[in-house]
Image (tube, grey):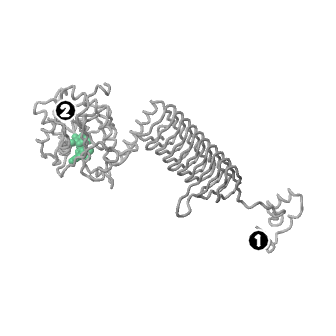
Amino acid sequence: MGIAETPAPAAVIVLAAGAGTRMKSRMPKVLHEIGGRSLLVHAVGAAEGAGPAELVVVLRHERERVAEHLAQHASEVSVADQDEIPGTGRAVQCGLEQVVATEGTVLVTYGDVPLLDPATLRDLVAAHEAAAAAVTVLSARVPDPTGYGRILRSEDGSEVLGIVEHKDADESQRAIDEINSGIYAFDLAVLRDALSRIGTDNAQGEMYLTDVLSIARQDGRRVRASVTEDVMMVEGVNDRVQLAQLGAEMNRRILERHMRAGVTIVDPATTWIDADVTIAQDAVVLPGVQLHGATDIGEEAVIGPDTTLRDTEVGARAEVVRSHVLLAVIGEGADVGPFSYLRAGTQLGAGGKIGGFVETKNAVIAQGAKVPHLSYVGDAEIGEGSNIGAGTIVANYDGVDKHRTTVGKHVRVGSDNILVAPVSIGDGAATGAGTTVRKDVPPGALGVSAVSQRNMEGWTLRRRAGTAAGDAARAALGTEEGAADRTPAGTAAEEHKEHEQR
Ligand code: UD1
Ligand code: MG
């Protein structure tokens, strides 16, 4: 069934009031992340995808912290507070207090079930409404049903009689392998009424939402179970082992989606891609790559091996090899790496290059400009077609403030320069090797600051006689001079003299 044909629920209530003690964490369970989003934001995303008129999240444990997270990441959600009465039934009752609608279908889901998808929820609503059921529970058959509520069916299996919690179940009920996923579609009016009639007379002294099924059935209403084949999709996170398992499964599904859309992923086993990452067709992801956050990869770009990108835009046909990149924009056909570190605010123009052992930050490197080797470029602008010599450092920080450096178009900065900010080098200018640029270099000028070179003839022969260097020099010069032994006293005096001359 297409999205347009599927009915939308009146409301979705997402339960997230539980403490999640088995996570053993200071952070609320539902704020733990997989695939670059919190469990709760995944769950709310699925709920939103079902297209409800109203969306309510029920909170209690760490209420303020979780509500703030929701406000940041899912603004269209209203928060309901569960009181001290425990249980999923009470949680839904508190959630319903926020729901304005009086009729229609209400979905209940959990904040700790991250793999659930909108299509499954829409199909549940469709099946529920087509059967004119009062309750439809999403169930699954699992190899080990321990801990779950079990689905009780009529003898021929066609009707659902109710759900019994593991702790309340007898031996024969515990042998049932069809479990309650905790995800349901309810008729809103039936749900409100049944919840007002459930108690806490059970093994856990809680208001069980599951009791709504037997109450509805006793009232002569239709109760159904819809069995899902996709067990992982309805699985919740209770501890960090499950967090890792569901994280790996989510990653596997994300990779598969990209591969089916035309992205080459050479080694899915070592590739991690967050849920929000977008990748264009014919991009190639090599082994050992992590793509995080709002990263966006262009057509035919090649990423990796061994590269981490976060919140980074990579243009078509660009290559990023063995690099670590945060909040950067890499232009079309640009080249990054190997071993480059691009920090926030780096913008590399089309066809530009950031090469080996280069760190950049808040740096706009224009089209065709290159920083090929061993450099730091921070708080700087490098113009179109310019080249920054190997080993050049932009000294952007004077110990108190950061300053900007501007390099014009088609500039040649020599090797091993220090550009002491604030400073600018004009269009078409150049600097000599080893220049410390403290003053602006005008357009078209050559800036040099290095002391001019002086050669002390025969130095090695006098000072390093008897060493391999002395022998090599002597052989090259064809003289016997270097064969003489060094005199340590003389050496010190000579060295002092040479030093004075510098
Ligand atoms: C519940 C179901 C069980 C089902 C299982 C699936 C009931 C009585 N049992 O059991 O049949 O097989 O889920 O995982 O419903 N929550 C609240 N408020 C509460 C209690 C729980 O909001 O007072 C929330 C939790 O945050 C969690 C969800 O409800 O997101 C499920 O709670 P949990 O304690 O895990 O339920 P189970 O006892 O495992
Ligand atoms: Mg649970």
Q: Position of residue 442 (x, y in %)?
A: 67, 53
Label 1 Cα neighbours within 10 Å, binned few <14 / some 14-19 / many ≥20: few
Q: Is residue 148 visible?
A: no
**Label 1 residue near ligand 1, CB within 8 Å:** no
Q: Is residue 97 visible?
A: yes
Q: Position of residue 299 (x, y in %)?
A: 52, 33
1 or 2: tag closer to the N-terminus: 2
412 lies above or below 157? below
State left or right for residue 174 relative to residue 353: left
Secondary structure at badge 1 equals helix
Label 2 Cα neighbours within 10 Å, binned few <14 / some 14-19 / many ≥20: some
Q: Quarter of the picture for ligand 1?
A: top left
For the point 29% across and 42% down, which residue is it? 76
Secondary structure at badge 2 equals loop
The residue tagged 1 is 500
State left or right for residue 243 relative to residue 420: left
**In 3D space, how far apart are the residues under numbered discs 1 and 2 (Cα atoms)?**
94 Å
Q: Are marks 1 and 2 in contact (CB under 8 Å)?
A: no
State left or right for residue 412 relative to residue 126: right
User: Please, what is the three-letter code of the amino acid marked with disc 1?
Assistant: Glu
488 lies above or below 269? below
The residue tagged 2 is 104
State left or right for residue 256 relative to residue 384: left
Quarter of the rendering occupied by the N terminus: top left
User: Please, what is the three-letter code of the amino acid marked with disc 2?
Assistant: Gly
Q: Position of residue 380 (x, y in %)?
A: 57, 52
Q: Which mark is residue 433?
A: none
Return the residue nearer the eye: 268 or 146: 268
Quarter of the rendering occupied by the C terminus: bottom right
